[in-house]
Image (cartoon, rainbow, N blue to C red):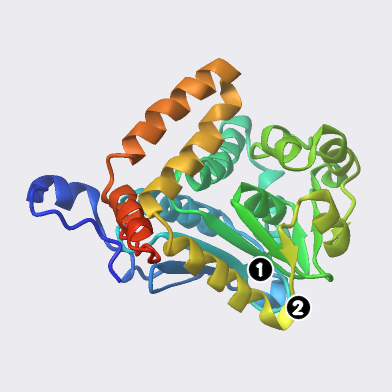
Amino acid sequence: MSHTPSSPDIDPGLLAGNRRPLAGYQATHFRFEVAGAVATITLNRPERKNPLTFESYAELRDLFRAMKHAHDVHAVVLVGAGDNFCSGGDVHEIIGPLVRLPAPELLMFTRMTGDLVAAMRACPQPIVAALDGVCAGAGAILAMASDLRLGTARSKTAFLFNRVGLAGCDMGACAILPRLIGQGRASELLYTGRSLGGEEGERWGWLNRLVAPEALLDEARALAASLCEGPTFANGITKTMLHQEWAMTVDQAIEAEAQAQALCMLTQDFRRAYEAFAAKQKPVFEGN
């Protein structure tokens, strides 16, 4: 089933400038593959628990920015190779160099890492993080910036920043984490840097659900694929509104949702859902 809008009325120049496939993208600093409409990003340094480097930060940022124009990707799975998700910034390749940099270069780095989170929140595709083993520091931030999180009982999430002499306000953590698990619980994790185990993380609402380690990637891909079977244009609107409404009053949010929903009512997927209901059939959405 195609999810690519294919109206013959679309101007070819507009289409070329705003619809680009990602299936052929060759990643340099992690693994990337597209199967169906699901892209899988695999942090691939298992011998070091998949730490991030300056280069992988930048490539991830640019890839998530490109997702806005990807007509062949409608959900993303983010996973770590081996038995761990991500141990954060590489101690030798990032932390060591940072202590020697002057302020302008340090700000360049922190803005780059923040831009990665902004790109993840701005891309229209839902992101499913598959968390096993260590999920620490910037790795915990990547999980936080995702839309859904599946985990294992042995997963351990830690926002480690204060344990290395830094503030917990890193890459949007003080804005996003309290909205996921509440102000008090977020404060505990950001002040103490302690690990949040899988079972506790599920109770807190950090994890959507727990699965067996050997089934984690399959479950994450199945969840992503199920999202691709839905009205993907409307899913993108939902993600946008979930993000934008943090800064709105209730009245502003109600009006913004009225406008967003009216836009979705113009889609063919809305018509397909009605016609399928009338025919007592399951709708087949096409993302337009």
Q: Which sits in the foreground, 134 or 103?
A: 134
Report the disc number at residue 50.
1
Q: Position of residue 143 (x, y in %)?
A: 66, 54
Looking at the image, residue 171 sits to the left or right of residue 58; the answer is right
Residue drawn at 28 percent across, 67 percent down:
2
Q: Where is residue 222 shown, x and y percent of the image?
A: 55, 72
Query: Quick one: label 2, few (<14), some, or many (20+) residues within 10 Å?
Result: few
Within the image, what quadrant is residue 173 found in?
top right
- Circle nearer the N terminus (1, 2): 1
Residue 52 rendering spot, x and y as whole percentages:
62, 59
Say if residue 120 shows up in the picture.
Answer: yes
Residue ranking furthest to the bottom: 214
Three-letter code for the amino acid on which mark 2 is drawn: Ala
Q: Estimate how packed mark 1 is, as few (under 14), some (14 to 19) or many (20 or more) residues with alpha carbons within 10 Å.
A: many
Q: In the drawing, does residue 249 fall left or right of residue 124?
A: right
Query: Dot 2 corresponds to which residue?
Result: 212
Q: Image point 37% across, 62% down: which residue?
A: 283
The image shows a total of numbered marks equal to: 2
- Secondary structure category for the residue under label 2: loop
Q: Is residue 84 above or below residue 52?
A: below
Q: Position of residue 59 (x, y in %)?
A: 46, 56
Residue 87 in sight: no
**Foreground residue among 45 and 210:** 210
Q: Disc 1 and disc 2: Cα gap in Å?
A: 20 Å
